[in-house]
Image: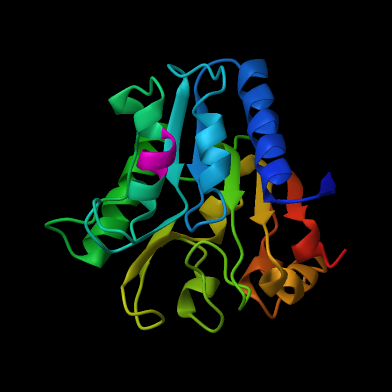
Amino acid sequence: MIETRVFEDAEAFARHAAQWLCELALRSAGKFAISLSGGSTPRRFYELLAEAPLPWNRVHWFWGDERFVPPDHPDSNYRMAREALLSRAPVPGANVHAIPTERISPKEAASAYEATLKRFYGAEMLLPQRPLFDVMLLGIGDDGHTASLFPGHAALEEERRWVVAVHGVKAQARITLTYPALQSSRESAFLVTGGAKREALRRARAGDRGIPAGRLRPAGNLHWFVDRAAAGQ
């Protein structure tokens, strides 16, 4: 299933996304794995989620990508999620699976995080009938990148590794999940706001393989949660 929901503004968008995720988690049984998106777009969504009646003891938190900076750095995706959500809710520390970025190289960090994902999943190979995540939250950049998969980068063609280091695209190195891991989710949601994303959103929704977001083919349902500015309405 693919659905698109357009909201009047960013606040309505955030409230719907929080309610949607909470309902999914409450209907689930056992561990519930969420891969978080970084950037500024989901911050309000995360703040609202912190107030939701999630089954906190069962929910496990992962990241789709991370800037290779210390966890207290202003650019850290972990720091944003911690401030907006994780520090404001009864989240067990053992359920937070951050991408390591200290006392380790980017390549080692990617290998370590892949090992973390495999331990949680309980297997070395991803099976189509058993997704790694219950919910995959994704953003999209003006250039069509998603997670830290950027146009023209070799990481786009990775089919074996679940996590790789990305160099030479931005000032900071990045650690990102690859398509095999990003696509292994029961529910995937792109969170897109603002007129600057309009063209990238149009191309991604059309499945344009010329941009990274357009190449994503999730195993489960795909949702587009966007505001009117991004949708061009």
- All told, the count of numbered labels is 0
Res 165 quadrant in image? bottom left
Q: Position of residue 7 (x, y in %)?
A: 80, 48
Residue drawn at x 47%, y 79% as measured from the top left: 154
Whether residue 191 sits left or right of residue 65 in the image: it is right
- Please name the colour scheme applied to the rendered image: rainbow
Magenta stretch, overall SS: helix
Residue drawn at x 59%, y 70% as measured from the top left: 141
Whether residue 39 sits left or right of residue 4 in the image: it is left
Residue drawn at x 32%, y 50% as measured from the top left: 99
Whether residue 39 sits left or right of residue 143 in the image: it is left
Q: Position of residue 38 (x, y in %)?
A: 47, 54
Q: Quadrant of the N terminus?
A: top right
The range drawn in magenta is 81-85
Q: Position of residue 92 (x, y in %)?
A: 33, 22
Can you name the residue that lies furthest to the right here? Answer: 233
* Camera sees residue 121: no
In the rendered image, the vertical position of residue 109 relative to residue 167, given as above or below:
above
* Viewer-side residue, 128 vs 154: 154
Can you name the residue that lies furthest to the left here? Answer: 103
Residue drawn at x 39%, y 53% as measured from the top left: 77
The answer to if 186 sits in the magenta stretch is no
In the rendered image, the vertical position of residue 8 relative to residue 165, given as above or below:
above
* Camera sees residue 139: yes
Res 211 quadrant in image? bottom right
